[in-house]
Amino acid sequence: MKIISSINNHKIKYLKKLRTNNSFRKKERKFYVEGLKEITLCIDSGFIIDSIYCSSKFNGILETNSLKADYIIDNKIMSQIIVRDTEGIFGIFNNKVNEISSTKFANDELVLVLDRPEKPGNVGAIFRSFEAFGFKNIIIAETNLDTYNPIIIRSSLGAVFKLNIFKLTFPQIKNLLKREKFKIISSDVDAKIPHTKANLKEKIAIVMGPEKSKVSDDFKKISDIVVGIPMYGDVDSLNLSVATSIILSESVNQRKIS
């Protein structure tokens, strides 16, 4: 165990850059995880630890959970690294790549496709809901969004580690969904068919559009049905994570009834 007591330590500069810089994380093939619960989920999901850091007052908590710190960081320095004031523990993990070619889909599989998502906080909230409802496979289309962005990890409460997440282009997604015989259901705020009228207990791929616009015409053209969520107030749209959760909840309800 090593002790870091200087803000100018090269390790501190490295950690700050890893936490804040997407391109640096990609280059290093590592990511930053803050919080004991999230670290535990990450380990349980098969990710390989590079190193664990904590402040002196949290070292006992690590040991109680059968974990060992590689570095102890001075409390004042720790406060300049961590995002949450209540946490004095974080870890660095190696990336894990999911290969969709080796994924087997069930006959009633529900795959979520996020078309060009933009906001890490919304994506993390979607991951949290998706895992909570018991689903597993998510495809992210045409995006540079970093799956292991600390905001995504935090807003998903670590659910990101429990999911199979694939980043693909539209042609790759189209070929996959057609080959695997998924029924494609896109969501659109202007759709005339309510989401409750669609059969959401089949082998389906639900496509949700980006926050600032709608599902792309490319996805609409290959969709079997386009649905919307009925709204009765003056507001004419919903937050992406909220809309996604409503449709996922309807699917769970339909599957329970069957």
Image (spheres, rainbow, N blue to C red):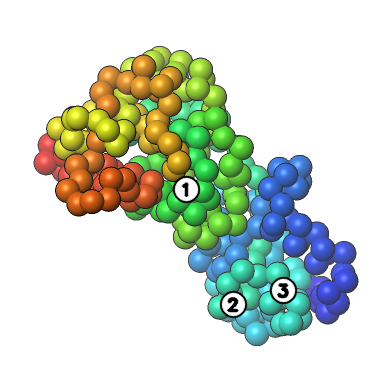
Can residue 203 be seen at all in this image of the molecule?
no
Which residue, as the protein is rendered here, is positioned at the far bottom? 57
Examine the rendered structure and indicate whether residue 187 appears above or below residue 241: above
Amino acid identity at mark 1: Val
Return the mark for residue 85. Answer: 2
Using residue 22 as the reference point, say whether residue 204 is left or right of it: left
* Residue appearing at x 59%, y 57% in the figure: 150
> How many numbered dots are placed on residues in this image?
3
* Residue appearing at x 74%, y 68% in the figure: 70
Using residue 239 as the reference point, say whether residue 28 is left or right of it: right
> SS at mark 2?
loop
Amino acid identity at mark 3: Gln
Q: CA distance from mark 2 to mark 3?
A: 10 Å
The answer to which of marks 3 and 1 sits earlier in the sequence is 3
Classify residue 214 by image quadrant. Answer: top left
> SS at mark 1?
helix
> SS at mark 3?
loop
Q: Which residue is mark 3?
A: 80
- x and y percentages locating residue 254 in the rendered image: 16, 39
Q: Determine crowd level at label 1: few under 14, some 14-19, many 20+ residues with C-alpha closer than 10 A.
A: many
Examine the rendered structure and indicate whether residue 253 appears above or below residue 11: above
- x and y percentages locating residue 88 in the rendered image: 63, 76
- x and y percentages locating residue 140 in the rendered image: 50, 35
* Residue appearing at x 31%, y 33% in the figure: 188
Q: Which residue is mark 1?
A: 123
Examine the rendered structure and indicate whether residue 178 appears above or below residue 76: above
Q: Determine crowd level at label 2: few under 14, some 14-19, many 20+ residues with C-alpha closer than 10 A.
A: few
